[in-house]
Image (cartoon, rainbow, N blue to C red):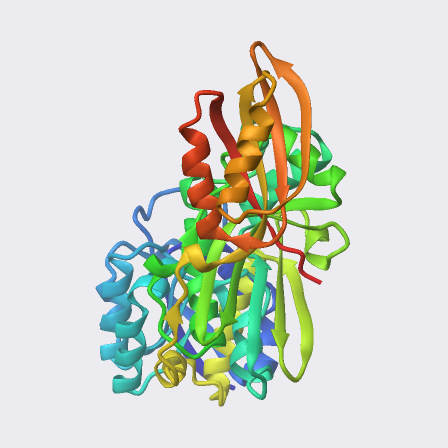
């Protein structure tokens, strides 16, 4: 049996998953890859830290060069996250002719071009299946299985933390704050949950999916991003009354040659398969002009699901797979697709407003909507808070720009306390 030595940069949650899989599934991996995989070194910050996992101490190092400069190490796994020093380590590994596997979506989404170009120049493979949706093989599906298709849209739930929070709010009537606290206690959310709840994590993942699915480079600044912190139980209730479920949806659609890229809370029909993706699971819905609609579903995070994707990438490299992802983004740059401005987005809208409980106020607001070309589907009023009442408008399909202009005028009304929330509605089939 041939032997290959690998180095691992990082021994956090995903790193522990990789270690467990390499040891637990050793026989299966050996048979499927044709290699006996030996972990030569693992980079950690503190070699004396107790990580709750049985790793021989002699394998640990706090010096990355013991991995990057070791000519006997052929594959490097980067799972430390962030931009630097991860980028520096990956580039050095490539220049030292080592193949690289990463799960680093932030790095790929923001600095991917240099990494892919370096991999191509140095003639090494660069795999990144674990960067999006954990154990779901979405990268391979787009790179290989769907290449005969013109992909029309990708819509998905690609952040497990926010999906867990929204699931708890929907089925257990939790507040956002209570659901977030539980997610942190169970390890689904970080102590600082900003990247998840403000949708940065999903934005980075959408940039990667868009670049592959639509053959173009993507600037993350062109992706509209909105987190879930404004979602209240009353919004969940109104959504349910109208047959919708609120999810943090990442989507990219092609409209007249431009790409509409956005991540935000969205009301989707409760009958749609994505509406039934709950807790920390992920689901990705892809429409192709030949295959039609397909959906991939599974655990989008966690040590073993993400570790599974990482180890699978290592096996693909050892097999000499035809799917040389090192050059996928560079060679997928077939078209220079322009991003569509957010104001050109067409959607239905849910708008919740706190207004003075006085005659004529609803008429005033409806008039403003009409002046800006926003057609109202229905209006609902429930309860009363002191001198103010909560009014909810559901609109027909309209332009985002029309909504923005109407909201600007409504905010100037002396009868309006505040715009409580605006949620887009996607009646995906």
- Quadrant of res 388: top right
- Provide residue 259's location: percent of width, then percent of height: 45, 69
- 204 on left or right of 98: right
- Provide residue 299's location: percent of width, then percent of height: 62, 56
- Provide residue 379's location: percent of width, then percent of height: 67, 34
Nearer to us in this view, 178 or 249: 249
- 410 on left or right of 219: right
Position of residue 269 relative to residue 175, above or below, is: below
Which residue appears at 54% of the width and 29% of the height?
364
Q: How many marks?
A: 0
Position of residue 356 relative to residue 197, above or below, is: above
- Provide residue 53's location: percent of width, then percent of height: 50, 49
- Quadrant of res 127: bottom left
Would residue 59 be seen by someone viewing this image from the given angle? no
Q: Quadrant of the C terminus?
A: bottom right
Nearer to us in this view, 311 or 262: 262
Which residue appears at 31% of the width and 62% of the height?
110
Nearer to us in this view, 88 or 372: 372
Would residue 394 be seen by someone viewing this image from the given angle? yes
- Quadrant of res 113: bottom left
Residue at far top of view: 386
Position of residue 133 relative to residue 387, above or below, is: below
């Amino acid at each position: 049996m041939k032997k290959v030595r690998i180095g691992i940069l990082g021994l956090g949650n995903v790193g522990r998953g990789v270690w467990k899989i390499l040891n637990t599934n050793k026989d299966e991996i050996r048979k499927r890859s044709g290699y006996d995989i030996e972990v030569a070194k693992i980079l950690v910050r503190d070699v004396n830290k107790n990580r709750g996992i049985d790793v021989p101490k002699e394998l640990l190092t706090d010096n990355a060069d013991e991995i990057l400069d070791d000519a006997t190490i052929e594959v490097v796994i980067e799972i430390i996250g962030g931009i630097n020093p991860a980028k520096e380590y990956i580039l050095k590994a490539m220049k030292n002719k080592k193949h690289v596997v990463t799960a680093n979506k932030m790095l790929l989404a923001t600095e991917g071009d240099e990494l892919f170009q370096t991999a191509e120049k140095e003639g090494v493979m660069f795999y990144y299946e674990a960067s999006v949706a954990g154990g779901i093989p979405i990268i391979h599906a787009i790179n290989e299985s769907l290449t005969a298709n013109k992909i029309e849209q990708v819509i998905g739930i690609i952040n497990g933390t926010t999906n867990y929070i929204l699931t708890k709010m929907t089925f257990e009537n939790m507040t956002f704050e209570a659901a977030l606290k539980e997610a942190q206690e169970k390890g689904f959310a970080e102590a600082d949950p900003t990247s998840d709840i403000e949708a940065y994590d999903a934005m980075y993942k959408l940039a990667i999916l868009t670049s592959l699915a639509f053959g173009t480079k993507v600037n993350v600044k062109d992706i509209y991003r909105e987190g879930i912190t404004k979602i209240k139980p009353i919004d969940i209730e109104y959504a349910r009354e109208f047959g919708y479920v609120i999810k943090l949806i990442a989507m990219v659609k092609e409209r007249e040659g431009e790409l509409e890229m956005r991540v935000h809370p969205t009301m989707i029909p409760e009958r749609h398969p994505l509406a039934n993706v709950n807790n920390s699971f992920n689901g990705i819905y892809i429409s192709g002009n030949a295959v039609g609609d397909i959906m991939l579903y599974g655990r989008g995070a966690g040590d073993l699901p993400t570790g599974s994707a990482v180890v699978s990438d290592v096996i693909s490299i050892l097999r000499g797979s035809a799917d040389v992802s090192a050059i996928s983004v560079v060679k997928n740059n077939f078209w220079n697709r322009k991003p569509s401005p957010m104001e050109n987005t067409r959607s239905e809208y849910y708008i919740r407003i706190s207004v003075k409980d006085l005659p004529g106020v609803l008429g005033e607001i409806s008039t403003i909507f009409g002046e800006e070309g926003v057609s109202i589907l229905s209006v609902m009023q429930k309860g009363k808070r002191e001198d103010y009442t909560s009014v909810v408008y559901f609109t027909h399909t309209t332009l985002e720009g029309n909504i923005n202009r109407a909201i600007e005028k409504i905010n100037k009304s002396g009868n309006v306390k505040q715009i409580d929330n605006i949620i887009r509605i996607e009646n995906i089939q």
